[in-house]
Image (tube, grey):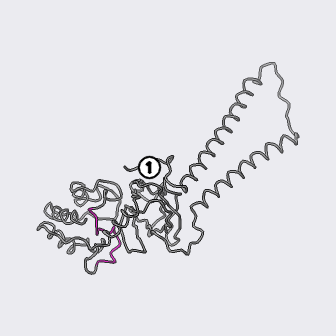
Amino acid sequence: MVTSNVFHPSSALAQAIVNLFKFAFVLSAVIMLLVGGLVTYCILRFKGRPDHPDPRPFYGHTKLEIVWTVIPFLLLVCLMVLTVKAMNASDPPDKSKAPDIVVVGHQFWWEARYPRSGVVTANEIHLPAGRPLLFRLESVDVIHDFWVAQLGRKMDMIPGHPNFAWLQADQPAEYRGACSEFCGVQHAWMQIRVVAESAEQFATWEKQQLEPAPTPTTPSAERGARLFQQMTCVNCHAIRGLPGNADARAGPDLSHLASRKTLAAGVIENTPEGLTRWLKNPQHVKPGNLMPNMFLTDAQTEDLVSYLQSLK
């Protein structure tokens, strides 16, 4: 089950933010009702009549002026303290510590790297449930904003200025995240899935991701593999085990593409039909993305789909 309910946090880090929001919301509602009620009362009780003289100005009441200055000041100080406390809950105290996961924002997809193991994937982040992980957040083009609301705070991703944040999932589940900083025409379709699983399941997934891409076993997939290397696909997309291809990072790593649930950062389901639509015309599916229309024939598309669907 994929969940994205902001008000059902799955970590103490996210719970601190929800608590802050609830307090600020209730406080604001009380102030609004109090001020609105007083204004309504004054309008009804003291509304002017034709035979009434102009009201006498009321000023110089020092005690009253002190009260209505001190009370808002104390409320703002309280909000500031709670805000700083919530921010510190997910702010890494030691940014020199090696990150557990590096997330890089691209227009318009997410790259996820696991420095300790060497795994590189895209648009789906797997992590072990039950422990906080240090994320290093980067961008290669414009400002993005990484936000998985149920797991932690949102954080800007600024080119040349990496940020750090703790994220944690208390329970195994799938969580939906998104870019929350307008980054271009496909900002709304820059989604991410975070898959929290047991330590054993995560270790199994990580081991599988480190395996070379499977060798094609059907004639159609073999033709697709040759086509992938003959066309410009190989210059942009890395596939583990493909010679001279390890540094291709312009597009998502496709080593185990078939194991992912969606394509193009959540735009379509990762099915043969969805992949066919994408390859035939990426700009029709996701206008403004950086993958050009290769004007593939039906036969070429079928062979590429067979090859890419074999990458599990």
Horizontal relation, residue 277 to residue 200: left or right: left
Residue type at mark 1 is Ser
Residue lying at the far front of the rendered structure:
200
Q: Nearer the viewer, residue 73 or 160?
A: 73
Q: Is residue 8 magenta?
A: no
Percent across and percent down for residue 293 are 25, 63
Above or below residue 304? Residue 27 is: above
Above or below residue 67? Residue 186 is: below
Rate crowding at label 1 as few (under 14), some (14 to 19) or many (20 or more) other CA atoms within 10 Å. Answer: some
Range of residues picked out in magenta: 245-258
Secondary structure under tag 1 reads loop
Percent across and percent down for residue 32 are 66, 37
Residue ID at (35%, 61%): 289
Residue lying at the far left of the rendered structure:
219
Which residue in the structure is indicated by mark 1?
4
Residue lying at the far top of the rendered structure:
51
Q: Nearer the viewer, residue 147 or 134?
A: 134
Residue ID at (56%, 72%): 95
Percent across and percent down for residue 101 are 45, 68
Q: Quadrant of residue 309?
A: bottom left
Horizontal relation, residue 311 to residue 125: left or right: left
Q: Is residue 253 magenta?
A: yes
Percent across and percent down for residue 35 are 70, 35
Which quadrant, please, contains the C terminus? bottom left
Q: Nearer the viewer, residue 282 or 92?
A: 92
